[in-house]
Image (spheres, rainbow, N blue to C red):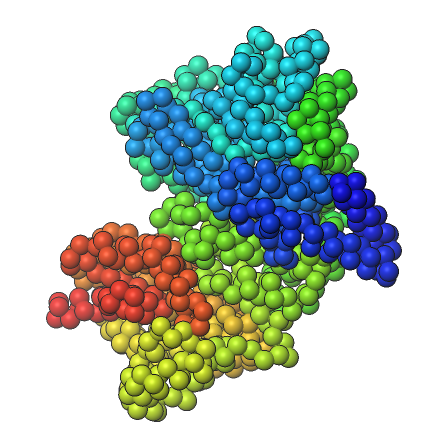
């Protein structure tokens, strides 16, 4: 049976090769049939023996074609095992069919080792238990799918932590860290993952369970491994560079030497899923300092910073991180000292004073141009966030050019780093390339994204030539091709330059002892794939596809916009990295990859590729994944590379339903402005009808509205009707935008805003014509209709946008303001009036600060709770609102996240559970825990409605609260 299955596999590969050569016709059909037959047999056998989830469907495959690297390999399917027995069962079936197996954690690997052509093992679903924490022994037992932050949170009450902490700590898994021998910022104090592993339980390729620890007597090693070490003692002793703290490349076979205690667990770390599958690990914990401080040292350039780094190590800092100015885009806002590059040096102590004193000592010792010491937690978090976001931020050069990993984490001895960086910059220049170095200067490890052209044959050829030359440069400085992220497909081909042919030959022999059938992550480390094959860009369209949005930051190319997602997966966090984070509410609600920003971007990538997702814009898999996108725009600001899934969703829906019947909610909620205008004269009888349950139920069913929802009442009088009766003020200085929600559903907000503006000496008028930002049309993908609506709006607003009459346009509803700031420009780029209107938009707080800077609001002196609107967070910013609240004596922080209603989303049938879960993430707990007398603020109509319907709490717009304060003063 095994021989037949392997023959089956060979036929499949032959069919795929013919398909590549011929492109279509009988060979392509044969390859498809062979693949489908193998998948069917595999799925049947796996489902029979595995208790976990077996999924060989289109969505599961599309979600795992890529990790955070430049590479793409299409798997046959994904299995989420429940336990070690499931892992053994998967290996047995795949061995029978000759199908590769790839273990995968958070999918944040940067060298391509978390992709594969067979079965991907997803440990993040079931095998994610923190088995135990032993504070006395300073150990913890974990399953491979445990997220690092989960372990750190569990250890924190005991004053302990896990030392290695990659910047992806909020979503990377312990299994992935073991596979890559991950390090992070604190390795100068606590070492790599291998330094912090006590023992491992590993299922081998043939189902044997190996217990790996230090010493042969404490371990159950593969047959022949000890003899292998004895036979090759000389090569293992002389073939590895010494005194290199970040030597991650290749197999750590030298850990098996007698003088190193024959540490099998250490030797296994960094094997990138090629030797066995970890099912449990006992990890060492370290004592966490009670207090920390951060010294930021400024230097002329990164070479100067690198040369200063080794001199700080004798002071035993917790970190010595480096970053150049061309990576930091917001340094004026976060208090970085003067310089062209910086060292981030963290210290610890029993008290804040002690930690701060050590940081000040380091600042003096660093011989910097200027230094700053920060010890308050909020200030340190703000600074560290810049460093942690660098993996994503660096993917775009300051001019917007794309930059890619591939030479992401070379390491040299720390004393060589300054010289290495100068030669590295010179090599970049000689190839006409640019990159932005940053990283772990104290360990000699440099991260960099480089603006390789990976789309054309000439660019890929230059990528290969540069890679070969850079490998030579690293080796010349006594370094390692990988200093943190592993070799994967990016560097393993070049390992002979570092280790020589003899030692690399032993890598293959070493792997074969563990994996005789070669099914574990083939093409990685031993007998590797070429570094310029399996590139993820080669399957994308060569010409831009026709789209409706302008994508100004991506050259008008939808594929380039989708390429923004590099897979660092900040959207996959179960909680935000800060209180104000929004992204990604649907992933936090469901825990499903397809409902993360990254997952949706992967599906769109595969839709454009057409290999896995074959239906293009008509794809039901893409539609279903985007269905739970709330269009909150959180990814636009929280994603390090600015993925804008709300826009991509609107684009997709436009094409998906082009010429087809839409869901009922698109007609009812997507065209809400039209329905509300028609309903306005009948507001009172319609409100009465909505209170009759059978009538309300019928209306909701016809409109595609969730049955759990209450239909909000219409205002008996619209704001516009009220104001037009008053007439236009004689000295109007601003235009008040009568958005649909304020005009028809909450005119009290508009009245309050006018009262406050008038008190501040700012008179407002409403436009003479009918205006609409088009938000509901955009969010449901009715982009043709949105353009018509926006065209009429620009006609109506034209008298207020000319040089003579240009005035600020005050928009009270944050979602409408965000739409006018961004979507308007991207949908109507050729109309100059769009830019004029976009630039005129002001929030309520911005209008007061700009038009009445000397005005003092009423003093309210009370705490606040509630939420910053997600669109305000993502597009508009809330710094001005914070200042206004502070002046009014409104104290406390508003929560982040998304309320879960999000315009039409929470009202649509089928979204109730996710909508509630999103509200329960941050908003509802914040409001419930607020003390009596707390003012509940929510500037968005959706947020106020969600709080009323889920918590029974009345929330108010800031304008309403200030207007009430003015009444009190009067």
Q: Is residue 614 visible?
A: yes
Residue 334's place in the image compared with 24, above or below, is above
Depth check: give the residue in front, 42 or 935. 42
Residue 726's place in the image compared with 201, above or below, is below
Depth check: give the residue in front, 854 or 861. 861
Q: Quadrant of residue 882?
A: bottom left
Residue 922, how many percent across, how many down?
33, 54
Residue 84, how many percent across, how many down?
53, 37
Give the position of the N terminus as an image quadrant: top right
Q: Is residue 293 visible?
A: no
Q: Quadrant of residue 373?
A: top left
Question: Which residue occupies 68% across, 44% down?
Answer: 118
Q: Is residue 647 left or right of residue 854?
A: right
Depth check: give the residue in front, 958 or 843. 958
Give the position of the C terminus as an image quadrant: bottom left
Question: Which residue occupies 38% across, 59% down?
Answer: 917
């Amino acid at each position: 049976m095994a021989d037949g299955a392997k023959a089956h596999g060979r036929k499949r590969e032959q069919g795929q090769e013919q398909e590549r050569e011929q492109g279509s016709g009988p060979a392509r059909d044969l390859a498809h049939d062979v693949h489908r037959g193998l998948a069917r047999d595999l799925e049947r056998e796996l489902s029979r023996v595995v208790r976990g989830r077996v999924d060989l469907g289109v969505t599961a495959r599309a979600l795992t074609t890529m990790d955070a690297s430049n590479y793409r390999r299409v798997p046959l399917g994904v299995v989420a095992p429940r336990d070690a027995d499931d892992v053994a069962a998967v290996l047995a079936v795949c061995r029978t069919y000759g199908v590769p197996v790839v273990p995968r954690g958070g999918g944040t690997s940067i060298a391509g080792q978390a992709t594969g052509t067979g079965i991907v093992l997803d440990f993040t679903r079931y095998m994610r238990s923190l088995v135990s924490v032993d504070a006395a022994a300073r150990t913890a037992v974990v399953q491979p799918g445990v997220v690092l932050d989960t372990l750190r949170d569990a250890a924190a009450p005991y004053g302990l932590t896990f030392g290695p902490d990659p910047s992806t700590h909020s979503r990377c898994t312990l299994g992935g860290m073991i596979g890559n021998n991950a390090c992070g910022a604190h390795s100068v104090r606590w070492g790599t993952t291998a330094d912090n592993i006590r023992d491992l339980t590993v299922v081998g390729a043939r189902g044997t369970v190996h217990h790996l620890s230090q010493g042969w007597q404490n371990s159950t090693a593969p047959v022949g491994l000890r003899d292998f070490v004895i036979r090759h003692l000389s090569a293992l002793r002389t073939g590895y560079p010494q005194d290199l703290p970040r030597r991650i490349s290749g197999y750590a076979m030298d850990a098996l030497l007698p003088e190193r205690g024959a540490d099998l667990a250490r030797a296994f770390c960094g094997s990138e899923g090629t030797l066995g599958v970890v099912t449990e690990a006992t990890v060492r914990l370290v004592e966490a300092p009670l207090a920390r401080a951060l010294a930021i040292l400024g230097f002329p350039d990164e070479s100067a910073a690198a040369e200063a780094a080794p001199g700080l190590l004798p002071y035993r800092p917790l970190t010595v991180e480096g970053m150049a100015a061309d990576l930091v885009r917001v340094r004026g806002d976060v208090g970085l000292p003067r310089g062209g590059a910086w060292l981030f040096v963290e210290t610890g102590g029993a008290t804040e004073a002690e930690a701060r004193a050590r940081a000040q000592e380091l600042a003096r010792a660093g011989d910097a141009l200027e230094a700053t010491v920060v010890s308050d937690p909020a200030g340190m978090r703000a600074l560290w966030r810049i460093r942690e976001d660098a993996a994503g931020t660096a993917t775009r050069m300051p001019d917007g050019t794309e930059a890619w990993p591939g030479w992401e984490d070379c390491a040299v001895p720390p004393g060589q780093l300054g010289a290495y960086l100068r030669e590295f910059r010179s090599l970049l220049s000689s190839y006409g390339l640019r990159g932005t170095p940053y990283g772990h200067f104290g360990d000699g490890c440099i991260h960099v994204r480089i603006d390789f052209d990976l789309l054309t044959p000439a660019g890929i050829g230059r990528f290969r030539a540069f890679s070969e030359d850079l490998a030579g440069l690293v080796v010349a400085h006594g370094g390692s091709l990988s200093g943190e992220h592993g070799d994967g497909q990016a560097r393993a081909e070049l390992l002979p330059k570092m280790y020589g042919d003899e030692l690399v030959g032993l890598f293959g022999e070493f792997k074969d002892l563990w994996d005789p059938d070669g099914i574990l992550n083939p093409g990685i480390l031993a007998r590797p794939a070429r570094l310029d094959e399996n590139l993820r860009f080669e399957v994308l369209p060569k010409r831009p596809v026709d789209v409706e949005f302008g994508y100004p930051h991506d050259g008008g190319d939808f594929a380039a916009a989708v390429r923004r997602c590099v897979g660092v997966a900040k959207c996959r966090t179960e909680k935000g990295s800060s209180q104000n984070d929004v992204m990604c509410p649907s992933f936090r609600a469901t825990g499903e990859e397809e409902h993360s920003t990254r997952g949706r971007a992967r599906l769109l990538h595969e839709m454009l590729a057409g290999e896995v997702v074959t239906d293009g814009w008509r794809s039901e898999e893409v539609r279903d994944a985007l269905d739970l996108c709330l269009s909150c725009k959180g990814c636009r600001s929280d994603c390090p590379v600015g993925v804008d899934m709300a826009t991509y969703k609107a684009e997709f829906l436009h094409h998906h339903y082009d010429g087809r019947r839409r869901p009922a909610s698109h007609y009812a909620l997507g065209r809400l402005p039209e329905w509300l205008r028609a309903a306005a004269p009948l507001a009172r009888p319609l409100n009465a009808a909505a209170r009759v349950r059978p009538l309300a139920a019928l209306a909701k069913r016809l409109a595609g509205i969730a049955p759990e929802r209450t239909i909000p009442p219409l205002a008996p009088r619209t704001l516009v009707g009220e104001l037009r009766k008053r007439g236009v003020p004689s000295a109007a200085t601003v235009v008040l935008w009568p958005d649909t929600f304020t005009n028809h559903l909450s005119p009290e907000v508009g009245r309050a805003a006018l009262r406050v503006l008038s008190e501040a000496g700012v008179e407002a008028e409403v436009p003479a014509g009918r205006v609409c930002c088009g938000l509901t049309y955009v969010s449901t993908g009715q982009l043709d209709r949105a353009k018509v609506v926006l065209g009429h709006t620009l006609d109506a607003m034209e008298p207020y946008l000319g040089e003579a009459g240009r005035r600020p346009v005050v928009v009270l509803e944050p979602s409408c303001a965000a739409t006018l700031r961004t979507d308007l420009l991207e949908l109507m780029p050729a109309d100059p009036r769009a830019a004029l209107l976009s630039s005129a938009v002001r929030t309520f707080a911005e209008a007061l600060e700009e038009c009445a800077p000397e005005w003092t609001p009423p003093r309210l002196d009370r705490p606040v709770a509630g939420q910053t609107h997600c669109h305000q967070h993502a597009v508009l910013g809330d710094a001005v609102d914070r200042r206004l609240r502070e002046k009014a004596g409104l104290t406390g922080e508003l929560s982040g996240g998304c309320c879960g209603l999000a315009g039409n989303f929470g009202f649509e049938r089928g979204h109730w559970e996710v909508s509630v879960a999103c509200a329960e993430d941050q908003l509802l707990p914040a409001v419930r825990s607020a003390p009596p007398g707390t003012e509940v603020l929510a500037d968005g109509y959706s947020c106020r409605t969600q709080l009323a319907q889920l918590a029974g709490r009345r929330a108010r717009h800031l304008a309403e609260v200030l207007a009430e304060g003015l009444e009190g003063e009067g």
